[in-house]
Amino acid sequence: MVIPLLLFVLTANAQTFSMETVNDSVSYLVLTTDSTTDRWQLPYPVYQFQVGDVNGNGSEEAMVGVIKKTRFHRDFGRRLFIFKNYNGLIRPLWMGSKLGGHLEDFRFIESRGTRNDEGGARNEGCGTIRALETGKDGTYTISDYRWEGFGMVFDHFIEKKINQKDKAYEKFHLDRTDTASEHQR
């Protein structure tokens, strides 16, 4: 009697986020669970799609990079939207207009048991969003952001003041671990 109930609980939590592209400016985020399918229209160009546990709740969220204007940033720019599964329906978790600098790209990094400044564990189970950004001076910065309370907050710099675009992208895609020597506050 306990085993069938346990199997139901385990399989009831199965979920998959995917992306369907209709054309260059319309895509659908799709959530498929054991019993439902939900679609969320994204009427913007999508440049990036990642899935991972951003907020440490044990469920995967969908991270979607879109190109659009916002109320506070009137120019077209790359934005990061994070969506969650709420009872089988896609719902926004965070619809960021900006991280730090001008967002060029992002990628999700699974939790590695990062540490806070005192050396203790922080946000166990939360992954990190690594961002490649440009500043007003035109140089590239690689930064890590983490979930805190309502949204993404700056965690630390991986590298600053990278002058060449190809070098910035090369360093951005390296799978560097989170060590104290990399932190530049």
Image (cartoon, grey):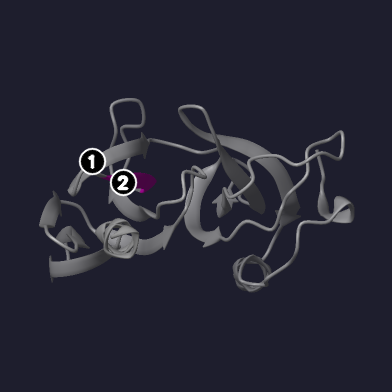
Task: Report the residue marked by disc 2.
Answer: 83
The magenta stretch is 78-85
Q: Earlier in the sequence, mark 2 or mark 1?
A: 2
Task: Report the residue marked by disc 1.
Answer: 91
Residue at position x 84%, y 35% from top? 117
Left or right: 135 in relation to 114:
left
Q: Mark 2–mark 1 contact, CB under 8 Å?
A: yes
Left or right: 37 in relation to 16:
left
Was residue 179 drawn as part of the magenta stretch in this picture?
A: no
**Residue 21 placement: quadrant:** bottom left
Q: How many marks?
A: 2
Q: Nearer the viewer, residue 52 or 29?
A: 52
Left or right: 184 in relation to 160:
right
Question: Please, what is the three-letter code of the amino acid marked with disc 2?
Answer: Phe
Question: Please, what is the three-letter code of the amino acid marked with disc 1?
Answer: Arg
State whether residue 75 is above or below residue 159. Answer: above
Q: Residues within 10 Å of mark 1 (few under 14, many from 20)?
A: some
